[in-house]
Structure formats: structure tokens, C-alpha cells
Amino acid sequence: MSMQNTMGRYDVAAQEDRSAPRTKIMIPAQLRGSGMRAFQTVVNDLSLSGFSATALNRMHPGSVCWLTLPGLESLQAEVVWWENGMAGCAFTNLLSPIVHDNILARYRGEGNYRG
């Protein structure tokens, strides 16, 4: 069986999503790592498969966390990286495109990331 066949739908969508332009945004939210207290954060970029946000305390890659955006239930994610007070996380389940678009419409900033 080739690698292509073993990749799940999520993996393919997440990989394609990584190359999409990132919208520069600032969304006030709460982030809670497994075994930690929730803290106020700012989401800096959001995609269907994940987000990056401020996290002054170290978050360990592979650990589970929950992001709570205004007006939404907590979204489970996994920490992918942490560096210099920023965390990058991948959602456990892809974000609905409708929810994603509604969030961006409310908090859209100026310009796009080229990253």
C-alpha cells in the first residue's frame, strides 16, 4: 500500500491547508493545556486545520489543549510547536468552513501572511 493510500482525509486537507494564505487576525480567546488552567490568549492565525496563539508558558508538543473562541464551544487541538511565547496547534477535528469564514469575517485584519 502506498503512502498516498494510507493518508486520511484529515491529513490530506491539513497538508493542503498549510499552503493556503494565512489571514492576519487578532482574536481574543482562552487556551487551556492539559492539566493547566485556562489563560487569555490572542489567536494570530486560523485555518481549517489549526491556529497559532500567544502562550507565554511553555506548551509541550504532542500535548492536548482546548481553544475557546468567543461564542463557540471549546475546540480540542494538539500542540505542534511552541517557541518564544507562541504556540502552533492542530485541531483534533477540522474546523467547519462555515465557522472558519464567520470567525474571519468578524475579526479580519489587514493583509495576509505569506508564511
Image: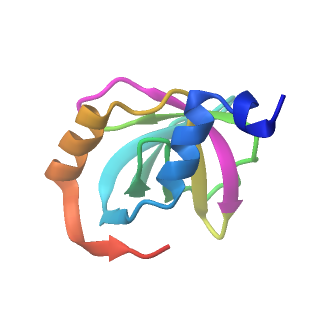
Q: Is residue 108 left or right of residue 46?
A: left
Residue 105 visible in this rendered orientation of the protein: yes
Residue 77 visible in this rendered orientation of the protein: no
Pick whichever, 110 or 114, lies toward us.
Answer: 114
> Which residues fall within the magenta stretch?
70-82
Residue at x-position 58% and y-position 62%: 86
Question: Percent x, y for residue 82?
Answer: 68, 58
Question: Percent x, y for residue 53?
Answer: 49, 56
Judged from this view, the residue extending furthest toward the front is 1
The quarter of the image holding the N terminus is top right
Question: Percent x, y for residue 39?
Answer: 49, 44
Residue at x-position 30% and y-position 53%: 27
Q: Does residue 79 belong to the magenta stretch?
A: yes
Above or below residue 92? Residue 107 is: below
Judged from this view, the residue extending furthest toward the left is 106
Q: Does residue 29 belong to the magenta stretch?
A: no
Pick whichever, 29 or 88, lies toward us.
Answer: 88
Q: Is residue 86 left or right of residue 79?
A: left
Dominant SS of magenta comes to strand
| Quarter assignment of residue 35 | top right
Question: Percent x, y for residue 110?
Answer: 21, 74
Colour scheme = rainbow
Q: Is residue 71 left or right of residue 78?
A: left
Pick whichever, 73 or 6, lies toward us.
Answer: 6
Residue at x-position 65% and y-position 55%: 57
Residue at x-position 66% and y-position 44%: 79
Above or below residue 105? Residue 109 is: below
Above or below residue 45? Residue 39 is: above
Pick whichever, 108 or 9, lies toward us.
Answer: 9
